[in-house]
Image (spheres, rainbow, N blue to C red):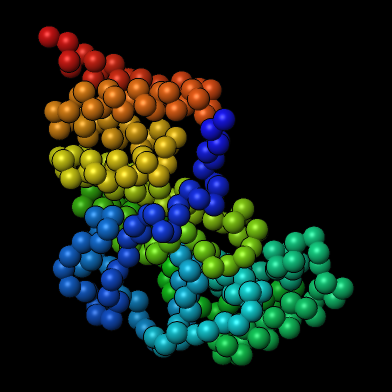
Amino acid sequence: MRRKWHPWTPEVLPAHQVQWPRCVERRTAHVATGWTPQGVPVAECERVNERGITVALLGPLEVRRDGVSVRLAGGRVRTLLALLAVSASDTVPVQRLASALWGEDLPVNVRRSVQTLVTRLRRALGSHMVSTMPGGYRLDVEPDRIDVLRFRRLLAEAGRARDAAEERRLVVEALALWRGPPFESIDSDWLRTAESAYLIESYLGAIERRIDLDLAEGRHHELIAELMRLTSHHPLRESLWERLLVALGRCGRPAEALASYERLRRSLADELGIDPSAELRRIHASLLRARTP
């Protein structure tokens, strides 16, 4: 029996297979022109000021102080930083931290155990970076210096963009923050359940937004290779297949588009026991009509 695919299995975005977009050089205000693996213009990757603390969670954990890498010893210290970082500038209650750090196997003295980890984190980042608040702790780092929060802000701004060019620029900048699966080097079931799934869906949705903008500009020829790669990594994500069929059709390759539809139809039936979406069926019918003399 074929193994069932689920969108939140760990292998959904294997770092060794997926070419994640990233800025290849971050030391200049706008780096040299070129293209990152997902079609992201390198020149559009803006530099974050290197003064202060920066936290990168979209991939392996990276922490920098004034541009210099900071090593965090201990898995729970890294998890604590990630938990505080995704809620930067907000107080995270001690009980929520404890549940995320230890699950059901809570220590005897929860408050003291969390405080011990906070002390170790302060030692690494600087005592002023983590504030003790009523009922919890707060990471005092500007949200834009944490890639997860910057990613969310850029996508929100893209949704309010005044035109397609600005929307694309913001989406591209957001995608360029990704270096791999979120929280890749952090062992936390809570982060995987509460944060990672949402972020991966947002990432794929952002790719689809950028592809739609490119399709609207007539760049369908440039998109086919990328869409084939994406559908191979996410074989049951119908929205990616919709865009692949459209691009193939616009490139004058209806036979390939119809063959792709048939592969997907069989996969959906075998894996999930469902038919293609109404939109896919509409695209399929349009391709069939286009082939009719």
- Residue 32 position, x and y percent, is 17, 73
- Nearest the eye: 163 or 76: 76
Q: Is residue 73 above or below residue 275?
A: below
- Nearest the eye: 4 or 188: 4
Among all residues in the image, which is located at the extreme top? 293
- Residue 162 position, x and y percent, is 26, 51
- Residue 21 position, x and y percent, is 32, 60
Q: Is residue 143 left or right of residue 134?
A: left
What residue is shown at x 41% (from left), y 52% (from top)?
Answer: 203
What residue is shown at x 54% (from left), y 40% (from top)?
Answer: 6
For residue 282, what is the image quadrant? top left
Q: Is residue 182 above or below residue 291?
A: below
Q: Kindly tell me whether residue 71 is visible in this rendering.
A: yes
Q: Kindly tell me whether residue 198 is visible in this rendering.
A: no
For residue 118, what is the image quadrant? bottom right
Number of callouts in the render? 0
For residue 195, what is the image quadrant? bottom right
- Can you say which quadrant of the picture contains the C terminus? top left
Q: Is residue 203 left or right of residue 6?
A: left
- Nearest the eye: 163 or 271: 271
- Can you say which quadrant of the picture contains the N terminus? top right
Q: Is residue 177 above or below residue 261?
A: below
What residue is shown at x 21% (from left), y 13% (from top)?
Answer: 289
Among all residues in the image, which is located at the extreme right? 108
Q: Is residue 245 above or below residue 29?
A: above
- Residue 111 position, x and y percent, is 80, 76
